[in-house]
């Protein structure tokens, strides 16, 4: 019984997560790229599945992992967090999500959240991190992973068009989009 408790604590403190890729288009199915090597990662989009609650014991580790993934993916424009397995989020977990969202904003990236349960969305709203929206079709929270990925692809595609427009002042600097508003 003691060893079982140690394993439960380890899984809670060191949460599993996975970068996802698309393995089928119709209907769309996304799976762990380490287990499905033929899974296709989408241009400009990082999809990450969180497989544990986000709470005081693992929030820093999760935030550090997300930072590492963003550093390793400089061409990422949109990040989709699949939270279907996040059964619980406390205020520390909510602050880690807020920190992640701010990091995305600093680097001109957009974050989208898929399949987070109502109590997790409520926690983020109570903390003032997100606002309540009746229409969840525009995010950042989506009821399905597919809807979040479709929005993320549209955002990534729109950045790609801007970055490839020779008449635009927009360009890629250090792997991040810089717009005319940034005084190029």
Image: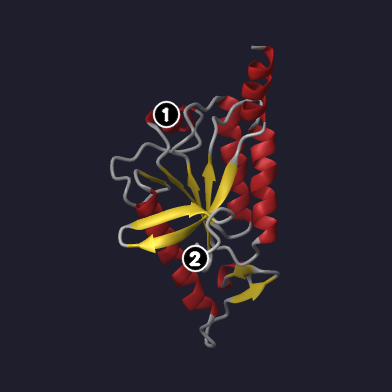
Question: Do residues under tags 2 and 1 come within 8 Å of each other at their CB atoms?
Answer: no
Q: Answer whether residue 184 is visible to the viewer in this image.
A: no
Is the C terminus in the top left, top right, bottom left or bottom right quadrant? bottom right
Taking depth in this image into account, of 156 and 182 the one nearest to the observer is 156
Identify the residue at image location x=41%, y=38%: 131
Q: Which residue is mark 2?
A: 42
Is 29 left or right of 91, judged from the image as shown? left
Taking depth in this image into account, of 60 and 184 the one nearest to the observer is 60
Taking depth in this image into account, of 10 and 42 the one nearest to the observer is 10
Identify the residue at image location x=47%, y=77%: 161
Is the N terminus in the top left, top right, bottom left or bottom right quadrant? top right
Q: Answer whether residue 152 is visible to the viewer in this image.
A: yes
Taking depth in this image into account, of 129 and 147 the one nearest to the observer is 147
Identify the residue at image location x=51%, y=29%: 127
Q: Relative to 40, does residue 164 appear above or below in the rendering?
A: below
Is 136 left or right of 180, judged from the image as shown? left
**Residue 122, label in figure:** 1
Q: Relative to 35, does residue 62 appear above or below in the rendering?
A: above
Query: Tag 1's secondary structure?
Result: helix
- Mark 2 to mark 1: distance in Å? 30 Å
- Image location (x, y in percent) of residue 96: 61, 36
Question: Residue 54 sits in which quadrant?
Answer: top right
- Image location (x, y in percent) of residue 12: 62, 27
């Amino acid at each position: 019984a003691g060893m079982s408790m140690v394993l439960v604590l380890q899984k809670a403190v060191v949460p599993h997560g996975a970068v996802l890729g698309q393995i089928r288009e119709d209907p769309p199915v996304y799976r762990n790229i380490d287990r499905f090597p033929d899974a296709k990662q989408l241009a400009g989009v990082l999809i990450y599945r969180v497989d544990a609650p986000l709470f005081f014991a693992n929030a820093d580790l999760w935030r550090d992992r997300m930072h590492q993934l963003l550093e390793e993916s400089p061409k990422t424009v949109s990040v989709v967090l699949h939270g279907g397995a996040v059964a619980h989020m406390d205020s520390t977990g909510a602050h880690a999500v807020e920190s992640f969202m701010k990091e995305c904003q600093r680097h001109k990236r957009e974050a989208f959240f898929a399949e987070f349960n109502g109590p997790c969305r409520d926690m983020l709203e109570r903390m003032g991190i997100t606002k309540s929206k009746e229409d969840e079709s525009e995010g950042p929270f989506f009821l399905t992973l597919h809807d979040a990925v479709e929005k993320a692809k549209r955002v990534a595609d729109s950045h790609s068009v801007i970055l490839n427009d020779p008449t635009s002042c927009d360009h890629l600097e250090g792997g991040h989009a810089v717009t005319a508003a940034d005084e190029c």
